[in-house]
Image (tube, coloured by chain):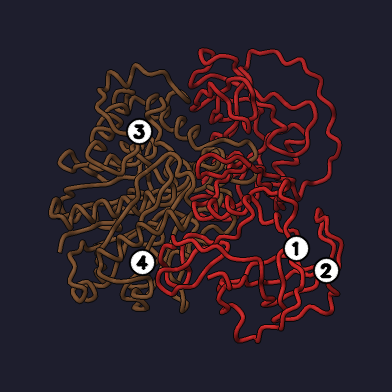
Chain colours: A red, B brown
Amino acid sequence: MSSSAEILSQAFTLGYTYTRSTGPIVGQFLTSLRARKMVGIKASDGKVLVPPVEFDPVSAAALTEFVDVADAGVVKTWCWVKEPRKAHPSDKPFAWAMIQLDGADTPMLHWVDAGDEAAMSTGMRVKVRWAEETKGLMSDVNGFVPEAVALLGELKPATSDEQITGMEAPIYLTYNFTAGKATARYLQSMKKGKLVGQRCPNCRNVYIPPRGSCAACGVPTEEEVTLGNKATVESFTIVYIPIPGNPIKPPYVIANLVLDGANLSFLHLLSECKNEDVRIGMRVEALWKPEAEWGYAMENIQYFKPIDEPDVPVDQIGKLIDEGR
Amino acid sequence: MRDVAIVAFAQSNCQRDAGAQNEVELIMPVLTEVFKQTGIKSAQDVDFTCSGSCDYQQGAAFAFVAGVDALGAVPPIKESHVEMDAAWALYEAWLKIQMGSAESALLYGFGKSSPGELPIVLSQQLDPYYLAPLWVDTIAFAAMQARTMLDSGEITEADMAEVVARSRNNALKNPHAQLKGDQTVADLLKEATYVSPLRRHDCCPISDGACAMIICTIEKAEEWGKPYAIIKGIDHRIETHHIGSRDLSRSVSTEIAGKAAGVANGPVDVAELYAPFSHQEIILKKALGLGDDTVINPSGGVLAGNVMMASGLSRIGEVAMRIIRGEAKRGVAHATSGPCLQQNLITVLEAK
């Protein structure tokens, strides 16, 4: 994580590892692609739609009649990408194009490896460059090329001829996440070993971690309140299930804790006691990691541990005034 | 159909990167402003709240739920969300008012696109079998649409540059705009292409920001004693996701929505059109049958600043505020979503 002035940011990749069922129509198109054949589907008006759709865009009738089309056709429109993005199918300049295959009545989208923008024109003829290995995905077409280009690559036979019913469709998107102003202030305090919340100017409730607003009153919160290390257990659960990637060995206790002087709980670990002794109202205290390990994170607190103080009655939890103020 | 009044509208500045502002911090100032304009205290003082946003933009799951922290939703309020531009939140609220289940509503839209690579993020809204796996982005589709029109001779590159020059010039008077300036068509045409045939200036910028609006029945507006503009018609149409089946050089859905909303029932003084790419303004103007006596995008439009998920509602707000200020008597606002103007929502607004 980097810090400059008030901005804390963190790059991360979000993955949606979807698998999708294709249904019979898309499945048939992908099955044909794997066998290096292009197919369309006959619409209600007799036109051939490529790629095939399940329902007629105009009449909404279910479509069923597949039609073989050529793996070559005409560029109907196109654009030239000078600087391909990382996610794009080509890492050198290329064209996106709407290509109407011979035998089809609608153009389909794919990319054209033409080498140079000057080699592209509306109305030009292009042909499929099949991938060396086909998998039943749009990328089985390794782009189109101008029709005159000789394709010499060796093509391996398809590994299967079973009907395709599903496909892997993972999506990875990268972001540079920035913490909000209130969160950034909070994390900067955490790095200094201090727990700093915010007070609502209206209802006077204190929130930690703060979000820059009072969710109950709908007003911005600005006044900062430094809180101590003592807290009360508002609720808890004992986790018995191992969670992949979690270094903590079950069973362990996760608790909703309300710091003295705060009015809303946050989640943290509870340790140094028997799990069966944990109870609502129990008094606990933060155990901080050594200062050298402090970062912009709640993990600066290793866990909370019990302290020898009388339990807080349930109706008093979240209403304790911090001793320090 | 019941008349619905727009009584308040506020928008943030369009900025390329809102940096350390979370969704609550983006929304809060525009909410405070519309509450002030209406003379109410919070979302508790309206019957219904609806927002528009898309979590994919900032890559934060349930950011729209976090946004509710800005509302003061204790005790619980009637609240809804559309994973779309907030113009569609207005549509939902308008329907609620038509049904008689609300007299007033708060709407807001927000977008923080700066954390991600927006054109690539938007590629994932496309067909998940045929298009999304190729990562074809929104700019590419718009560029192919522009070429279709250039090839047919329907428009020229100079026509496109004229839209940009006028938009950026109009934006000089818009304090919220991100891109503004005094450039001639000749200057603009000197620039190199970006995703040809588009130049960079043909594409809207990427912006962070938010906007908010309050609508209500005429009776409620009179009770609040605030000036208002009236929604006379609203209609939304969608075109097929099979992009090869569409005629990209026209917007059939806008034509139908415009007719259904009653655009032609009177003179149109002002129109705010959500055209993220210059040539799309030309398509929309034609689809709505707007003549040269209609002032188009006096705010500079989205070519001057485009907060995804808020810009559509802002188009409606821009027209409403011009009517409220007495600068126009009748206007049209347009919101869009999807590749090459796939979805279009038309709102017709009139003075009291």
Helix, strand or loop at mark 2? loop
**Could you tell me if residue A138 is visible in this image?**
yes
Q: CA distance from mark 2 to mark 4?
A: 49 Å
Residue, disc 1 = A303
Direction from residue A159 to residue A97 in the image, left or right: left
Residue, disc 3 = B279
Q: Nearer the viewer, mark 2 or mark 3?
A: 2
Helix, strand or loop at mark 4? strand
The image's mark for residue A272 is 2
Q: Earlier in the sequence, mark 1 or mark 2?
A: 2
Asked if marks 2 and 3 touch (Cβ < 8 Å), the reply is no
- In percent of the image, x 51 and y 46: which residue is there? A45
Which is nearer the eye, B315 or B11? B11
- In percent of the image, x 72 and y 46: which residue is there? A292
> Which chain letter matches label 1?
A
- In percent of the image, x 35 and y 38: which residue is there? B178
Q: Nearer the viewer, mark 1 or mark 4?
A: 1
Labels 2 and 4 in the same subunit: no
Labels 4 and 3 in the same subunit: yes
Residue placed furthest toward the front:
A324
Residue, disc 4 = B106
| Residue type indicated by callout 3 | His
Q: CA distance from mark 3 to mark 1?
A: 59 Å
Q: CA distance from mark 1 to mark 2?
A: 9 Å
Q: Position of residue A208 (x, y in %)?
A: 57, 64
